[in-house]
Amino acid sequence: MTQPSQSVVFRPQQSRFLDIPQAPLCYWLEDRFFELMSDQTIGHYVSVRKGLDTADNERFVRCIWEISASLNQRWFIFPKGGGYSRWIGFEQHFVNWEHSGTRIKAIGRGTPKNEFYYGDSGLTYTEFARGCLGVRILPEGAIFNTSAPGIFLASNRHSPSLALDSFQALLNCRISSFLLRTYQPNIQHLGEGYVTLLPMIRLEQHDLGTISDLCVRLKTSMVSRNLLERTFDVSLHALRQNIDYKTAAALHLLEGFSEKLVFESYMLDDNAKDLVIEETGTPAAWFPLIQGYDNLSNIDQLQLPISISEYLQTHERLDISPLVLAELKSRLRSLYEAGPRAKSEAEESENARISDDDDDQVALGVHIPIPAETFLEELSQKLEVHPISVYWMLREGIENEGWRCLPEERRITADRTTVFILRLLGHQWPKQIEAGEAVPEWADSEGIIPLTDGAAKSPLLQTLRKLMPSELGAPEASVFEREFSAVMGKNLDQWLETEFFKHHTKQFKKRPIAWQIQSGPFSKRRNPAFACLVYYHKLNADTFPKLRTHYVGPLRRRYETELHGIGAVPLDARSERQEKRRVLLENQIQELKDFDSRLERIANVGFGPKGLRAVLRQAAIDDAVLHLKALWLDRLQDTIAQGPLPGWVHLAQETALECPIEDWIEEAFSHIAHHCSRLGPKPPDQGQTPGDPESGDLAELICSHSSEMIRGALSLGCNEWWQKIDSQLFRPFREKIQKLREENKRLNDEANHTKSFSPRNSQALRDLGSRIKAIKVQIKQLKNQLDEQVSRAAQVREAIERWEHPEAETWEPWLGSQPLYDAVSTLDGKQRPPATVEEFVPQESSYAPDINDGVRVNIAPIQKAGLLLSDVLSAKDIDKAISDRIQWRSDERRWCREGRLHQPGWW
């Protein structure tokens, strides 16, 4: 209720609340809603499931543009929400689900719910979308998110007449959002359990499936113009035609028709319809058409169903006077020129009155409209005119009167220029990769393009001018630059130097893939000595050494040669121009020297800044201890295999248990080294270790715990095979016993009930007594059998855990002679492992980027060195990102030693 001061009384029958699942106190609803909500629900036909919660998105989730094609076996599509969107969209993320999520599971904090459904095609929606249910396609192979649940056909409902596309149309109708707000205590959160409570209709009697399929196709065409989406179409034609109002008009027409069919199927009366519309807003295609602006011919080229044309023939049309039409067009022009999401004073006032988190008011049905997804729909809602009529008026104004929407033109121009630049750097979008499209020959093979003059390569502006007409499909360079300046209010060269990277960083959600690295700032008076764009996916350990040797070094030598030439001219013979040039050259040479020094520091210690050296040193000690413990356990494993293991196996065979216990024992003691992180002493604290420990120091520490490690290894090995025997042999006995106990309790309850009305010696009581006695005998027999089998298995376990090996205490000299590290500790599995902690720390400090770590981690050292045009990360996140990398790499090495991974992820 928007005006609490008014007296409004509702008198629903109290018993009706009990007929509705969850019994929500929805006293304001019309009677028809009570009937619908107490009828069959869609939960009989679909399953709505929570998905994966990684518990650490910085580590396990990447934007699609951060991951290259060569890594797609490790990263899976992860539509994790992002707001309200119907039909398709928000496919902008990947999740690391290699080996069925081994890494996420190893951390132990993530929650991979409903893993059985991962990879299945279905539907999904964003839970937190301000009470608006927007259902979209969940593509095959994707993994759904905990905040974007998956919707799948129930296993027993795979009927051709009940396809998911029909459910998508039903759920995308605003009545679904309206009813969910009724069910849900907090309407800001559309929980998966409540979606299944929505009332069902006879889907097979309508064209909902066909309409849904068309809506998906039209929305796909529109989404393909978004640079951030997985389905982005890189073709420049699509970019030039970025605002496709015709497609939007057809989409909203179909959405309105779909809403009409659903409303009719629910058989809502006018009062009920008004209640839904008042709270969720009017569908754009329900507004009246304007006579003379109602032609479907051009839009109908999209092959809309015949039923749509028939529907439009009876749709309300307004025959307005020329004066009223002129006023309407004037309003449209003002709204269009203001751009998308521009708010009027009335809207600002309404937004201030209704707070997002004012749940009490929201729960009483305050007006929270389904948000507009296109500029055309927004204009239609504000004018209360059908999208088709808005489309024709817009087209007329643009073509005949020169209407312009500068905010949209700026967006499109920036997008086009961004695509030019990224393609020059060699970037490909997923759609190009899936089609097997080759990287163009004119793309830079190194992924390094200078922005300033003087380098060995042409600067970006010259390259763009050269390639725009022939390769990039843009107008002639001079034409494009004039258009660019007129729209953006800044020349192209200025925008490239000072605005592109900022725009790119913001648009790509602080995960830019074109990095602007420069020796100094751009200003009105002078440019930096050197600036360039570096492509993220070409980044490797050689990038910064290459910048030094191929770009900065030659440029500095060229300047030094020129300076030497000026210096050879006597001071009194120099011109004013030469003297100014001398000063400039001296400044630029010094700037390049400083820049070169910072590049060298990044290359050598980019991932090991001074403040994190202690963390790296601890990681080095931790890995050395794990490696040596694994070697010690390997030797113990060999000793067991050649010593007591055959006897243990023979003892297991003598138990005659009906399971392969001997095979399980052999398997359990074939990888003892995998327990290295759970056995033995903890690594020494680097803060209390003045000198770097060597193999001998750590061997002494490890071997002093020999007896403890043997006992632990035997216990863990026994736990492993005991879990298998418990699952296969003991658990079935316990389950049978439990069922008999439940049956016994039921019979006892029945006997007590029978005593109340039957003679004490009745036949019924005697029969019940006999059955209870027989069940007790069965329980006793099963317990005896279980105890006997557990006893036989326990004898084997006791024999194994009694084993001792005092000789292990003499292994210290051998262990102390072993290398401190192995191949797992290297950068690529091929180089020589570090020999000491002192070698390990510089190796891990060097700038050897792994694309899997994402932009956040890999850009942190560059921002810390002050080499970027503008900041990407917050100040507090720079060291955190580098510290995260240290921890992630430590975990990867540990998981390799535990047998969870075959090799570290950076190999």
Image: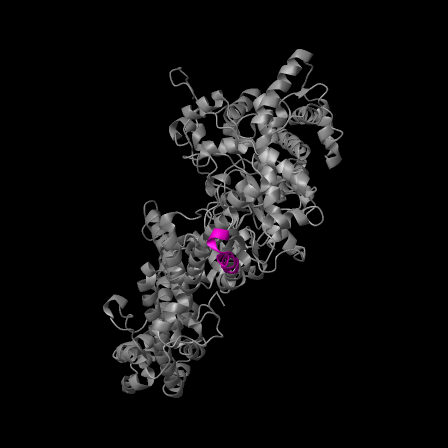
Residue 614 is inside the magenta segment: no
| Image quadrant assignment for residue 350 | top left
Which one is in front, 361 or 514? 514
User: Where is the N terminus found, in terms of image quarters?
Assistant: top left
Percent of width and height locating residue 554: 53, 61
Q: Position of residue 643 (x, y in %)?
A: 37, 88
Foreground: 301 or 660? 301
Provide the major secondary structure of the magenta segment: helix
Q: Is residue 532 above or below residue 388?
A: below
Does the magenta-highlighted stretch encompass residue 562? yes
Q: How far across and how far down the image is residue 751, in percent?
A: 35, 51
Regarding residue 518, the answer to whether it shows in the image is no
108 with respect to 479 (left or right): left
The image's colour scheme reads one colour
Is residue 648 in view?
yes
Q: Residue 254: horizontal and vertical position, in percent?
A: 66, 33
Q: Which residue is farthest left?
A: 688
Considering every residue shown, the one lying at the far front of the view is 572
Residue stretch in magenta: 560-573
**Residue positioned 56% across, 29% down in the render:** 339
Q: Count the marks: how many?
A: 0
Q: Image height check: is 301 above or below 527?
A: above
